[in-house]
Amino acid sequence: MPHTPPFPEPASEPEPVTADPPASAANPLLTQSWLDLAFLHWAADPGDVAPLLPAGTVPDTLDGVTYVGLVAFRMHRVGWFRLPGVPYLGSFPETNVRLYTVDAYGRRGVVFRSMDAARLIPVAVGRGVFRLPYVWSRMTVRREGATVTYASSRRLPGPRGAYSRITLRIGERVDDPTGLEHFLTARWGMHGAFLGRSLYLPSTHPRWPLHRADLIACEENLVAAAGLPQPAGDPVSVLYSPGVPVRFGRPARRPGGVPTP
């Protein structure tokens, strides 16, 4: 449904949605792999999303609609620079509530409203050093054949009682993703704020291997706990991916990946 947003449009035309990354990260700040991902998405009113975004960004829309994503996966071997990834502390289940953004330079990205993770030390580092909305949760990811179940129950800092339980059955490989599937998954950076400044953290990885999936069960209140209206009805898109290796470049305020003082 078309929507006239009560917020400014980006100063630049949004960059095209591309299935492959627009740039490489030859000297990465962070490396990691994302494995066994479940992508669940609901349509959202841009007016509900806009107040939750960092300064300098607005909701990214497709045909006047934006989306809220619930993404569950296994983080694997987070590492710094070109060093090998950490095997234990760098590997854990994670579930994110994320929104879709575009900034004044036309860069499309995501904004994380919450990041539930099962390792306390990475949560503390993510919150304390990077100001990311990590929370410590009990979490599991279990796969039996083509069925995958993701479960989380929040510990600290809360709100206590925030949880999710998702079960899906992996379906056929997606050889030709729809425009919506590209829009929701082909994201090459994240918007955030650090020390009062809006920043863009570029990322790069191989093209997503995607599968459509049947949602067997979904019980959650993480979306509402993240300050968004509780989704009504089933997700408009349910996808699965076996995963990709990921590199994050240096934070930048301006295009080109050049950090500013």
Image: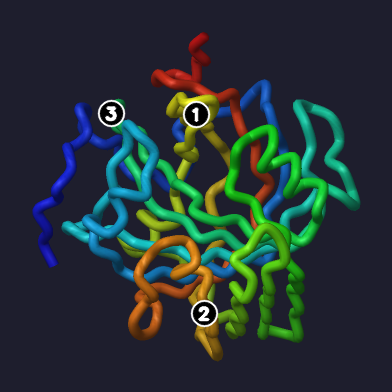
Three-letter residue code for mark 3 = Ala
Apparent side of residue 235 relative to residue 121 in the rendered image (left or right): left
Where, quadrant-wise, is the N terminus in this rendering? bottom left
Residue 136 numbered tag: none
**Residue lying at 60% horizontally and 56% vertically, measured from the top left:** 115
Q: Position of residue 23 (x, y in %)?
A: 50, 28
- Marks 3 and 2 sit apart, C-alpha to C-alpha, by 35 Å
Mark 1 nearby-residue class (10 Å; few <14, some 14–19, many ≥20) = some
| First along the sequence among labels 3 and 1 | 1
Q: Nearer the viewer, residue 130 or 144?
A: 130
**Residue lying at 60% horizontally and 77% vertically, measured from the top left:** 164
Q: Which residue is mark 3?
A: 104
Apparent side of residue 136 relative to residue 10 in the rendered image (left or right): right
- Marks 1 and 2 sit apart, C-alpha to C-alpha, by 30 Å
Q: Nearer the viewer, residue 5 or 204?
A: 5
- Marks 3 and 1 sit apart, C-alpha to C-alpha, by 19 Å
| First along the sequence among labels 1 and 2 | 1
Q: Residue furthest top?
A: 261
Tell me the SS state at disc 3: loop
Q: Position of residue 152 (x, y in %)?
A: 68, 73
Three-letter residue code for mark 2 = Ala
**Residue lying at 67% horizontally and 84% vertically, measured from the top left:** 146
Task: Say above or below: 93 vs 129.
Answer: below
Q: Position of residue 33 (x, y in %)?
A: 71, 49
Task: Say above or below: 97 vs 171.
Answer: above
Three-letter residue code for mark 1 = Ala
Q: Which residue is mark 2?
A: 213
- Image depth: mark 3 or mark 2 in front: 3
Q: Which residue is mark 1?
A: 23
